Amino acid sequence: MQLAIGLSLGLLISVLAWRTGTLSQSGAIAATLSGGLVFGLGGFAWAVLLLVFFISSSLLSRLPLSGKRSVGEKYAKGSQRDWGQVLANGGLGALLVITFTLSPEKTWLWIAYAGAMAAVNADTWSTELGILSPALPRLITSGKTVEPGTSGAVSALGSLAALGGSGLIALCAALLTTWGSLDQTGFFLLIAIVTIGGLSGAFFDSFLGATVQAIYYCPSCRKETERHPIHICGTETNHMHGWRWINNDMVNFACSIAGASVAAGLFLILN
């Protein structure tokens, strides 16, 4: 019964997101399944973290900022999320909630979930707000200055945005944690653990973007981009560097895995 209610809520939210243009049709289907599992099996606390990520990141991605328009051609996809983006950001969460349902005594799974949500939220916030940086970003691997929107680039503003996105999820996770005796020290420790996990995932995302993610070149615009096979201008793009089979969705999924692993690892070490 609870799962049926969760799937119904997932369907309702997904349809609303599709009607407002936040999700594509395929994204709405994927969100119904992944979100429905989180809502139905995880309950209120798990649902809140997913909704905080989805609502905050969707609002930021749809803000009509001039800086975002100038770099939109670099990104593989637009602000309307498809099934690949939905599963890249929420697929691990669905797997974790299924595992937690089977083994509810493993409380570290909740921390792993919070770390995963913190990571994808941090990554989204840094991407959406980092492009507003007045200074040129630098590649995380070499420190070389590059154009805004370049995969693997980081900036001070983007890093602060990542901290804010990760910290928001961490605060919500600490407020929603009901098991054990979470005193004041435990409360702030949990915030720190999840925040660090989220930031680790976001920076790992940047590292993968600078090293192994497939990057292409548009001979017409003379710019590098994640878009393939056709650039936003209609020209066919050519492979520049990175592994062809690793796209941005795969990098985002790896980001969530890194955030979950770091948060859960720190929790297990410190408890």
Image (spheres, grey):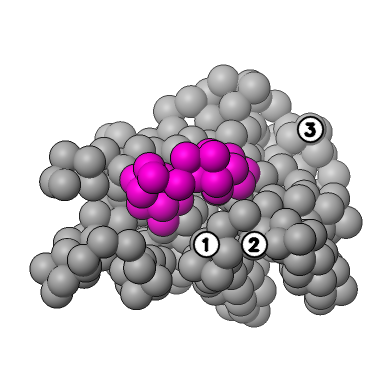
Give the image location of residue 16, x and y in percent. 81, 74
Can you identify the residue that label 2 sits on? 39
Decide: is 182 above or below 255.
below
Circle number at residue 46: 1
Question: What is the secondary structure assignment of the residue under circle 1?
Answer: helix
Q: Are marks 1 and 2 in contact (CB under 8 Å)?
A: yes
Q: Nearer the viewer, mark 1 or mark 3?
A: 1
Going by the numbered disc 3, the residue's amino acid type is Pro
Mark 3 neighbour class, 10 Å CA radius: few under 14, some 14 to 19, many 20 or more: some
Residue drawn at (35%, 38%), measured in percent from left and top? 261
Name the residue that disc number 3 marks.
229
**Above or below: residue 33 compared with residue 208:** below
Q: Earlier in the sequence, mark 1 or mark 3?
A: 1
Residue at (56, 57) in percent of width and height:
42
N-term mark: 1 or 2: 2
Would residue 37 be counted in the magenta stretch?
no
Residue 44: image x %, image y %? 55, 70
Image quadrant where residue 18 sits:
bottom right
- Name the residue at 24% across, 55% down: 193
Question: Quadrant location of residue 170?
Answer: bottom left
Q: Which mark is residue 88?
A: none
Mark 3 vs mark 2, foreground winner is 2
Left or right: where does residue 148 sit relative to residue 225? left
Q: In the rendered structure, which segment of residues is drawn in magenta?
A: 91-115
Q: Nearer the viewer, residue 81 or 148?
A: 81
Circle 2: residue type: Phe
Residue 96 in the image: state x and y as whole percent.
52, 43
Q: Position of residue 54 (x, y in %)?
A: 60, 66
Q: Residues within 10 Å of mark 2 (few under 14, many from 20)?
A: many
Position above or below: 136 against 18 = above
Q: Residue at x 11, y 68 (%)?
A: 185
Amino acid carrying mark 1 in the image: Trp
